[in-house]
Image (spheres, rainbow, N blue to C red):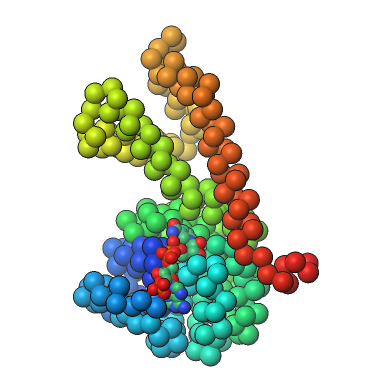
Amino acid sequence: MKAEYKIAIIGAGNIGLAIAEGLIASKVTKSKNITLTRRKHHLLDQYEQLGFITTKNNIKAVQNSDIIILSVEPSQADGVLDEIAEGVEENHHLLISVVSGLGIKHIKKRLGKNIDIVRAMPNTAIAIKDSMTCLASTSSNGNSLKTAAAIFNTLGLTKVIREEQMAPATALAACGLAFFLRATRAASQGGIEIGFHAEDAIEIASQTAKGAAGLLLCNRNHPEFEIDKVTTPRGVTISGLNQMEHDGFSSAMIRGIVTSAEKASRLYVTEEDDEE
Ligand SMILES: NC(=O)c1ccc[n+]([C@@H]2O[C@H](COP(=O)([O-])OP(=O)(O)OC[C@H]3O[C@@H](n4cnc5c(N)ncnc54)[C@H](OP(=O)(O)O)[C@@H]3O)[C@@H](O)[C@H]2O)c1
């Protein structure tokens, strides 16, 4: 990947800024090569002080870039695509969209340009280079996916999926971050009730969650295999675990993920989708 790619992040909100921070932390590029846009661009002052270019002029940002990262809300995307279309150049720009629910076919049609488009579904752990990012492209040449993977591989793990799996990926990877955070908070609340100060409880719970995930990622074992090592007959772990299952622990997580995936699949339905 070219070290000095110029990147425009159109819609520098939660995820746009997390990507910008991750790109700098992983040394993919320097802050002077990243343009951040949002309408209330004064809210980006602290990023300007860190060397990023900040503006509310989306076209200027696009014209000064090789890679466009689109990170506005789904309802804002069409307006932004109409606005930037004149600045987008075929055979030059790669557009990476993290907008949930917005299809590649729709983006191409709206831009009226035949450019390479990759959809990416990261989560906010991208700011600390620990995202799970799912990538999809419909382009027959693999170069755009390679470029996107080269960027996002420095920001955590990536997985290439089919475009129709993007809504499920939104639920499992992007919303999933909140699910595991809530589970960690619940664990820490239990920890407080059994005698730890709040800050100790959250630290113990967070490191324990990190260790559990690390075991799965390092050993590539099934979670139950690792659980079997912790649960002795008539032991304390199995009694706590079974109590959680009686109260619907696994079922609540599964239902939450299915509900989020269903909602993600309805986030952005266009007239042409309705016609199909
Ligand atoms: N947050 C996540 O964990 C996550 C993960 C994966 C994907 N996503 C997707 O990423 C997208 C953004 O999510 P988010 O949570 O980052 O939302 P957000 O914090 O609301 O960010 C959206 C940003 O877009 C800016 N914006 C709106 N209209 C604009 C325009 N015309 N020109 C330039 N900037 C504009 C907004 O700032 P102004 O109002 O100042 O313009 C805002 O800062 C969504 O489609 C979401 O589904 C989010």
Seen at 25% across and 75% down, the residue is: 45
| Residue 210 makes an appearance in the image | yes
Question: Looking at the image, which is closer to me, 130 or 147?
Answer: 130
Point out the residue furthest to the top here.
Answer: 234
Looking at the rendering, which quadrant does residue 194 occupy? top left
Question: Looking at the image, which is closer to me, 191 or 95?
Answer: 191
User: Residue 6 at x, y = what percent?
Assistant: 38, 80
Looking at the rendering, which quadrant does residue 8 occupy? bottom left
Seen at 37% across and 54% down, the residue is: 125
Ligand 1 image position (quadrant): bottom left
Seen at 53% across and 31% down, the residue is: 250
Question: Looking at the image, which is closer to me, 125 or 14?
Answer: 14
Which quarter of the figure is the C terminus placed in? Answer: bottom right
Which quarter of the figure is the N terminus placed in? Answer: bottom left
- Above or below, 170 against 181 in this view is below
Point out the residue furthest to the front here.
Answer: 40
* Left or right relative to 272: residue 123: left
| Residue 158 makes an appearance in the image | no
Question: Looking at the image, which is closer to me, 191 or 68?
Answer: 191
Seen at 78% across and 69% down, the residue is: 275
Point out the residue furthest to the right here.
Answer: 275
User: Residue 65 at x, y = what percent?
Assistant: 41, 83
- Above or below, 220 against 59 in this view is above
User: Residue 205 at x, y = what percent?
Assistant: 31, 34
Looking at the rendering, which quadrant does residue 264 occupy? bottom right
Number of on-image labels = 0
User: Residue 120 at x, y = what percent?
Assistant: 51, 63
